[in-house]
């Protein structure tokens, strides 16, 4: 039987949205064939936005929201701010250690470790946003910090000369003068990535950038990513208002006693505010786009606003259907909600497992067979390629077969989470 926490103890919409996000993250990261993939299931090459570009910022948005729930719950239990800060530091360190292990596995060539990455960015944003929220959980203060990060990042990327360019004068090294504002290699964020990587190579004797000259999860672009996380915290603070905590109870009472509760309900008001805020951020990102283009690789300020608008809209939809209307309590619908709760209950574990399985299957070599190499069937191929070609693309690889493989792999990653769910085991780092 499906058991879920009561609406008063958790905001289930956040758990469901986390599960949807991590499932989609695994899906878009692991197609059967990168040469055959639907456009919306791949990142925009540079400027622009696809459905896939929403996934990572939405996860950071949820990290920020979850921070508020965790901090307020632990403070209510009597834990000190110092203990919470140490816990955040420990958790960020574990996330970073997991990232380093996955980067080195399975060959452990320690001189080619990529310091940056998804888990590194999650660790940094979680730690810094958590410490900020320990200092203040006022919505206006967090909004000022987030706005400062976005404007500050724009100022840095727009007005600071890019060092190392062969130009006639310093003024020509400023973006929009002799170079585009977001030239892939000649921008300030890319320069910081290269400088930091050179430092790690010199001091730690290791380091590599994802795109050689720049990294999509680089150091400077972590600043606007932190703003994404703080926007999630602001949304959670709004949901955790005293009147918002009672919304599901009021809705339940209204369903049972329609004449005893006002038609103008608090759940409707909360949902409308989330939708309106999402629309404003969406429009803000769109208006900023011509001057500071929407770009996931550089996590531009316009990208933060644009993606946060989508995140707020998704949260509003999940909140209305899950926490207010309680559709998961209806037998015919609850099984549509259950998979996302399972995925969301151990989201980091699912993501780490997916990376581990990918690296392992690429490392394992098996006879390819005539289907892959007709002239040399005994030639070795990765277990990943063998599984894709023999089980999904026996005749030829297409976008559909590539997507089918990604869906099957996501289902494989779901099974361990299901076992943990059934045993009520929730892994915490």
Image (cartoon, grey):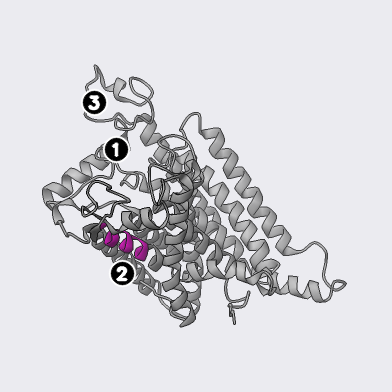
Residue 356 vs residue 78: left or right?
Answer: left
Give neighbour class at mark 3: few <14, some 14-19, many 20+ (Cα, 10 Å): some
Q: Examine the rendering and report whether any part of residue 350 can be seen.
A: yes
**In front of the other: 168 or 396:** 396
Residue at the image position 49 percent from the left and 65 percent from the top: 66
For the stretch drawn in magenta, what is the main secondary structure? helix
Could you tell me how far apart the alpha carbons at marks 1 and 2 are, in whole angstroms? 29 Å
Q: Which residue is mark 1?
A: 190
Q: Earlier in the sequence, mark 2 or mark 3?
A: 2
Q: Which element type, helix, strand or loop, lies under badge 1? A: helix
Residue at the image position 35 percent from the left and 64 percent from the top: 352
Q: Examine the rendering and report whether any part of residue 11 can be seen.
A: no
Indicate whether 306 appears above or below 348: above
Q: Which residue is mark 2?
A: 90
Q: Are marks 3 and 1 in contact (CB under 8 Å)?
A: no
**In front of the other: 43 or 12:** 43
Q: Which residues are the magenta region?
A: 352-363
Q: Earlier in the sequence, mark 1 or mark 2?
A: 2
**In front of the other: 393 or 9:** 393
Give neighbour class at mark 2: few <14, some 14-19, many 20+ (Cα, 10 Å): some
Number of numbered markers: 3
Could you tell me how far apart the alpha carbons at marks 2 and 3 are, in whole angstroms? 40 Å
Q: Quadrant of residue 34?
A: top left
**Numbered mark located on residue 278 in the image:** none
Q: Which residue is mark 3?
A: 165
Give the percent coordinates (x, y) of residue 117. Answer: 32, 52
Q: Which element type, helix, strand or loop, lies under badge 3? A: loop
Q: Is residue 329 one of those drawn in magenta?
A: no
């Amino acid at each position: 039987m499906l058991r879920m926490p009561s609406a008063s103890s958790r905001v289930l919409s956040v758990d469901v949205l986390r599960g949807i996000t991590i499932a989609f993250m695994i899906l878009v990261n692991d197609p059967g064939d990168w040469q055959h993939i639907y456009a919306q299931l791949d990142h925009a090459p540079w400027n622009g936005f696809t459905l896939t570009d929403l996934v990572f910022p939405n996860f950071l948005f949820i990290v920020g929201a979850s921070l508020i729930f965790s901090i307020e719950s632990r403070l209510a239990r009597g834990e000190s701010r110092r203990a919470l800060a140490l816990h955040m530091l420990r958790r960020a360190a574990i996330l970073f250690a997991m990232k380093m292990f996955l980067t080195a596995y399975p060959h452990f060539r320690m001189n080619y470790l990529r310091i940056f990455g998804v888990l590194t960015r999650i660790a940094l944003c979680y730690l810094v946003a958590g410490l900020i929220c320990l200092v203040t959980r006022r919505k206006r203060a967090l909004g000022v910090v987030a706005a400062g990060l976005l404007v500050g990042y724009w100022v840095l990327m727009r007005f600071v000369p890019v060092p190392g360019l062969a130009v006639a004068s310093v003024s020509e090294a400023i973006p929009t003068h002799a170079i585009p504002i977001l030239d892939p290699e000649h921008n300030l964020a890319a320069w910081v990535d290269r400088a930091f990587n050179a430092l790690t190579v010199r001091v730690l004797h290791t380091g590599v950038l994802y795109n050689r000259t720049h990294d999509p999860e680089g150091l400077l672009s972590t600043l606007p990513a932190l703003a994404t996380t703080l926007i999630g915290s602001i949304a959670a603070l709004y949901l955790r208002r005293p009147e918002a905590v009672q919304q599901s109870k009021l809705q339940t009472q209204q369903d049972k006693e329609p004449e005893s509760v006002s038609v103008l309900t608090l759940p409707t008001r909360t949902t409308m505010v989330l939708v309106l805020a999402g629309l404003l951020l969406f429009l803000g990102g769109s208006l900023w786009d011509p001057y500071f283009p929407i770009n996931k690789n550089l996590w531009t300020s316009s990208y933060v606003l644009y993606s946060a608008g989508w995140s707020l809209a998704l949260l509003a939809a999940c909140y209305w259907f899950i926490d207010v209307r309680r559709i998961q309590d209806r037998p015919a619908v609850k099984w549509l909600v259950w998979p996302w709760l399972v995925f969301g209950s151990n989201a980091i574990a699912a993501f780490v497992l997916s990376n581990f399985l990918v690296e392992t299957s690429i490392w394992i070599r098996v006879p390819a067979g005539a289907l892959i190499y007709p002239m040399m069937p005994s030639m070795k191929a990765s277990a990943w390629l063998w599984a894709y070609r023999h089980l999904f693309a026996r005749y030829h690889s297409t976008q559909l077969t590539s997507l089918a493989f990604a869906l099957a792999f996501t289902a494989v990653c779901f099974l361990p989470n299901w076992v943990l769910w059934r045993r009520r085991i929730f892994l915490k780092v």
